Amino acid sequence: MSYHIRTKEDYDKNYLHSVERKNQFWEEIAKEFTWFQPWKKLMDCNMREAKFNWFQGAKTNISFNCIDRHLNSIGDQTAIIFEPNLPSEKAIHISYNELHQKVCKMANLLIDMGIGKGDRVALYLPMIPELAVSVLACARIGAIHSVIFAGFSSGALAARINDASCKMVITADGSFRGNKTIDLKGIVDEALLECPCVESVLVAERTMTQVRMKNNRDFFLAPLLEKASTNHEAVKMDAEDPLFILYTSGSTGKPKGMVHSTAGYMVYTAYTFNNVFAYEKNDIYWCTADIGWITGHSYIVYGPLLNGATTIMFEGVPSYPNPGRFWEIVEKFKVNQFYTAPTAIRSLAKESIDYVNKYDLSSLKVIGTVGEPINEEAWQWYHKNIGKEKCPIVDTWWQTETGGILISPLPHISPQIPTFATNPLPGIEPVLMDENGLELNENNTVGKLCIKEPWPSIARTIWGDHKRYIETYFSAFPGYYFTGDGAKRNDNGMYRITGRVDDVIIVSGHNLGTAPIEDAINEHPNVAESAIVGFPHDIKGNALYGFVTLKEGAEKAVQLESEINALISEKIGPIAKLDRIQFTSGLPKTRSGKIMRRILRKIAEGDFSNFGDISTLLNPEVVEEIKNGKK
Ligand code: PRX
């Protein structure tokens, strides 16, 4: 493909070209794909109004580009390898031809069930082939998929289904995770009590557990698919037609349904997958994420398949049946590119090194990380023990909102500096801003990370709330996209992401907003108020610390802590449970009633050295009490 960057000269040339002749640069890349109708204008964007139009007037279909486009050349090649949770269960290899048949059948079934272009379909599925097939089938018929991570609780699921008025839910009877079986259908049933918009539910059978099926609403998937035809012509989608909605936590209130559109997302994810992982024909690529997150969308399904790659889908967890599982899989399939999260690396680094050394990892060429800052110790462990000091590490920085990787080392091109995401990819212009909204132009500086020019896969809006989209990302620094992250730029212009500068906390690589967790806690009848902050954790990166004030007269019963965590599990999901809970008689507040979180953050971190100016506090005496009661 013409868009490969494989040398430093390629990178420099491409970067310059992308900035100086933006339109021409993207047009050349876009030529790689099948367009049913060419674009009239490459782009028409306005950062202040958050209006993004790429490949205006063009028609294409991303599912067609992922599958049909490859059938003549590599139809028999494996597209997806499914590795089950249980190592003794056989892996399934699905060729591009087989994937085509499966996706066409599913597309026809969706149409039969009354799903059409623009309808929203919620996918609440384990990491089984049906998930990838459903994603691609929705894209094929122009339905908007909303994948909801199958670890979310029924309340969180219902909120997401209702937010986008999904007409259909595709789920499974249950899911296997390690030695646990989770009753997914039961969770869906509970959620649907609150979701009048859902007309039908398709149920894949995975665990073969007994489930309740509601007449005329719930249908098992397999028998219907069996009858469906394998002939289906992909719908000609407008370049800007929405492709999917994916929810991400905000620092306030309800989750944000980020909307991605068709053509820009397609071009950008394909381009970045190829270059960041230096993917070559016949390579076996494995990203350990879940398709319930953006990493899985862009770099398990779309990016790899657009490149005709072989991509692994792993159903299980890194620790089951033992902490050697990842490395066993690398050996088993001779994985060439391996992409995981710092949390997984930290947890596996704690285990005996025998779990790594037992396996032959010599197939690996590039290893990557995503989702949170990687600490130096974890980086060095990964470099030495997994990369054997020969594989470049790509520390990829990006977000649900960005659709694809924006800042990342490129293998054998960028310098390897632990904890640095290093350089922007071509087409991406990062800037650091100071408190006054001015660009910091010098190197060796820290600031708030913004992106100056639009790129093809930037989210188009928040579902149903464009105003919130503008307010969250485009109003702090008008004319720029504000990422919510802080970053440092070193003497050589390399970027290191330092972490969130808002009320989002990243726990084990999952974005969690503090407000929804506090709302959940506050629903407990004994709780008056609460504040959540993050504190450093060896494995999870950050863990959650809750300061909770009880109502007058309420008893601090022993079981209160577990009741609070149970409430959080029920409302959001177990990923948002608190590691520490401290009951206090009050929370430090300014005179205007705002909780001073920076004090709570310092206390949670165990840093009592300097609380800064607390003279504006309404109740300074509470700080001493909280300090003394620190868990
Ligand atoms: O804070 C950054 C962190 O993850 C946030 C985005 O989270 P999410 O939308 O869930 O997407 C995660 C997968 C792309 C960012 O704002 N983050 C992501 N990658 C890195 C990172 N922080 C540091 N280094 C990274 N490589």
Image: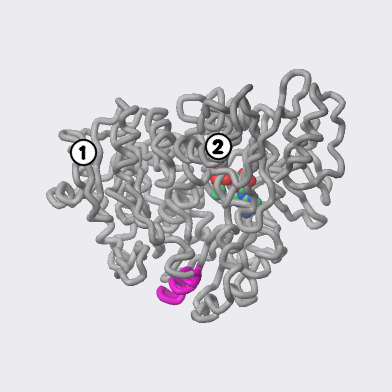
Q: Is residue 82 above or below residue 103?
A: below
Q: Is residue 80 visible?
A: yes
**Residue that badge 1 annotates:** 218
Q: Quadrant of residue 308?
A: bottom left
Kind of element beneath mark 2? helix
> Which x, y percent locates residue 245?
43, 37
> Which x, y percent locates residue 91?
32, 68
Locate residue 240 relative to residue 186 in the image: left or right: right
Between disc 2 and disc 1, whose residue precedes? 1
Question: Magenta residues, as a range?
Answer: 323-337
Q: Amino acid at mark 2?
A: Leu
Q: Amino acid at mark 1?
A: Asp
Locate residue 588 relative to residue 568 in the image: left or right: right
Does the stretch in magenta take in 617?
A: no
Count of marks overlaid on the render: 2
The 10 Å Cα crowd at callout 1, few under 14, some 14 to 19, many 20 or more, is: some
- Near-viewer residue (242 or 322): 322
- Near-viewer residue (390 or 559): 559
Q: Is residue 510 above or below residue 98?
A: above
Q: Is residue 313 visible?
A: no
Q: Residue furthest left?
A: 227
- Colour convention of the picture: one colour
Q: Quadrant of residue 623?
A: top right
| Disc 2 from disc 1: Cα separation | 38 Å
- Near-viewer residue (230 or 68): 230
- Residue 560's tag is 2
Does the stretch in magenta take in 329?
A: yes
Q: Residue at x 70, y 45 (%)?
A: 631
